[in-house]
Amino acid sequence: MMKYYFLVVLSVFSAACAQMLLKQAARQKYPSFLRQYLNPWVIGGYGIMGCALLLNIFCLSRGVQVKELGGIESLSYLFVPLLSWVFFKERITWRKAGAIAVIMIGVVVFFM
């Protein structure tokens, strides 16, 4: 059963990575409206998001409860800022770090 929870965390991390691909696509200029939405960054980002969705559905069918899935998905509030800091050099202020800490504490309390 524990492996399905790990798969949910992996799903959340992959969705955060997909958001990085979509951010990269948004940072570029495209010659046409169609190319803006049909390029490797966008297709890859949405492809990974789709895989994360399928992985969530698989884990739900194996016994992970919806309320637990929602709590675990809040890890995206940790993964996305960290990945954006690594790949895009976005700042994580003390205020943001504090907010992330409060969210993580809330998740721990929820699962106790």
Image (cartoon, rainbow, N blue to C red):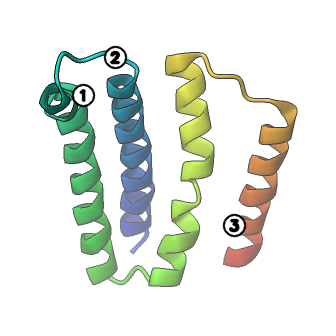
Q: Earlier in the sequence, mark 3 or mark 1?
A: 1
Rendered view: 79 above or below 89: below
> In what quadrant of the picture does the N terminus appear?
bottom left
- Report helix, strand or loop for mark 1: helix
- Report helix, strand or loop for mark 2: loop
Could you classify mark 2 by the number of other residues whose Cα lies within 10 Å: few (under 14), some (14-19), or many (20 or more)? Answer: few
Residue 98: percent from left, percent from top: 84, 45
Q: Nearer the viewer, residue 48 or 23?
A: 23
Mark-to-mark CA distance, 3 and 1: 32 Å
* Rendered image quadrant of residue 30: top left
Residue at the spot 40% in from the left edge and 62% down from the top edge: 8
Residue 111: percent from left, percent from top: 67, 76
Q: Name the residue that disc number 2 marks.
A: 28
Q: Earlier in the sequence, mark 3 or mark 2?
A: 2
Of the two numbered discs 3 and 2 in the rendering, the one whose residue sits closer to the viewer = 2
Could you classify mark 1 by the number of other residues whose Cα lies within 10 Å: few (under 14), some (14-19), or many (20 or more)? Answer: many
- Report helix, strand or loop for mark 3: helix
Q: Is residue 84 left or right of residue 27?
A: right
Of the two numbered discs 2 and 1 in the rendering, the one whose residue sits closer to the viewer = 2
Residue type, numbered disc 3? Val
Q: Name the residue that disc number 1 marks.
A: 41
Q: Are marks 2 and 1 in contact (CB under 8 Å)?
A: yes
Of the two numbered discs 3 and 1 in the rendering, the one whose residue sits closer to the viewer = 1
Q: Nearer the viewer, residue 21 or 70?
A: 21
Residue type, numbered disc 2? Gln
Q: Residue furthest front?
A: 32
Residue at the spot 39% in from the left edge and 37% down from the top edge: 17
Residue type, numbered disc 1? Trp
Q: Is residue 20 left or right of residue 99?
A: left
Q: Is residue 43 left or right of residue 77?
A: left
